[in-house]
Amino acid sequence: MSVTEIPVQHLFTMTLTDVRADRQDFVGPFGRRIFERPSGGTVVGARVSGQVLNLLATDYGNASVDGSIRHFDANITAQTDDGVVILMQIRGRASPTYGAGQSRIQILFTVGPGAYDWLNGVQAIGIGRDAGGDTIHEVYALTGAQEGDATIGSAAPGRERTSVAAEYLFTRQSQHTPGAQRHIIDSPLGKRFLTLAEGGGAFQGPRLRGQFVPGFSWSPHRIGTLHEQPLLHYDVKTLLRTDDGVPILMSYVGVYSTAYPDQSWMTATLFEVPAGPYAWLNEVQAIGVGRTFGGGAEYKVYALK
C-alpha cells in the first residue's frame, strides 16, 4: 500500500484522566450514545502547558451498536500555566482500523488575543491511546508543507514526530455556481461566511470515485482576522455519490490563515457511509489539503494511519 507522510509539528501531549469514571452509555431510537467526562488532565508541550479543567471537558459522542466504531464529539477546555483559557473542539474516530485502545482526532482551537492566539490559525490532529483509565493524545499542527512518499513507520514517535502516515483517498474538485451570491452575517456573536454556491464536481482516487452532488453543501464558516490577516474556520457538510451509486456524507472543518501557504488551507474530515463496499470510510479520521482551483477548490484527501 502506498503511504504518504503529512508534515506536522508537535504541539503538546494531552492526558485526560479517569475518562470512563463518569460514563453514560445507552442505545436509543437514534443509535448508541456514549458520554464521557474526564476528571481533569494536563497539556504539556514546548509552547503550551497547563491543566484540563474539570467540568469543562465532555465527550457527547456516539458509536456503532456493538461499540467497535466510536465517533468523538467533544469540547475540552484547558487553562495554561499562566492563566489563559483555551477551548478545543474535537471530533474523531476510534475503530478497528486503528486497533484496540487507539484513536485519531481533529481539533480546532478558540483562544483570546495574546501569547496563544496563533492556535486559532492551525488545524490540529491527535493520535490517541488508552493508558489504564486515562487517554493520552499526542497533538500536532498540520504545517501545510508539501506531503511526500514514505514507508510505514518512518516517522519518529511522540514529540520527535515530524510527519504522520496517511493513505491517499481521493482528489475532489468542486465548482461554484456561476453568479451565485456569497453571504456574510456580521452579528454580535461573530461573523459568518456562507458559501452556498457549490455547483458540483468530481472526485477520484484508487479505491473510490464519483460526483460531488450539487445542492447538498452547507458551509457556515466563521470568518475573522488574526494579527490583521484573514482567518477562516471552515465548517462544511457535503454529499458525494460514487459512480456505483453509494451516497457518502463528507463532513469537515478546517483553517485558512497565514500559517499555511497562500491560497491553501488544511482540513480534517469524517465520513458517514452505508453498509457495503465503502463502509471502511466510517472508521477513519482523514485530513485534506485544500487549494484554489479555477472557479472552485481542489482537495487532496488522506486517511490517517
Image (cartoon, grey):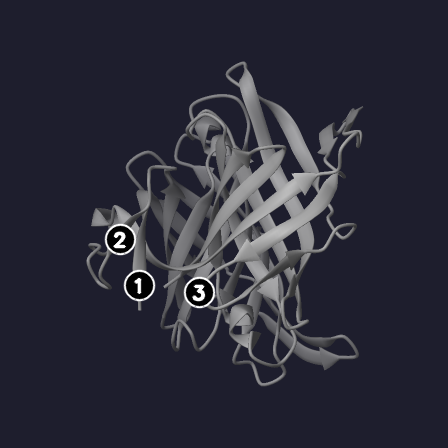
- State the residue in front, 291 or 13: 291
Mark 2 residue type: Asp
Q: Residue at x 59, y 31 (%)?
A: 232
Secondary structure found at label 1: loop
Q: Please identify the quarter of the rendering in which residue 2 is found.
A: bottom left
Vertical order, 2 against 224 (above or below): below
| Contact check, label 1 and label 2, Cβ < 8 Å | yes
Residue 21 visible: no
N-term-proximal mark, 1 vs 2: 1
Secondary structure found at label 2: strand
Locate residue 57, reporting x and y percent: 56, 53
- Looking at the rendered image, the quarter that the N terminus falls into is bottom left
Q: Gap between marks 3 and 2, in whole Å?
A: 16 Å
Q: Name the residue under label 3.
A: 206
Q: Which residue is drawn at 44% across and 78% down?
A: 96
Q: Please identify the quarter of the rendering in which residue 101 is found.
A: bottom left
| Contact check, label 3 and label 1, Cβ < 8 Å | yes
Secondary structure found at label 3: loop
- State the residue in front, 250 or 126: 250
Q: Mark 1 points at which residue?
A: 2
Q: Which residue is drawn at 60% across and 81% down?
A: 276
Q: Name the residue under label 2.
A: 149
Mark 1 residue type: Ser
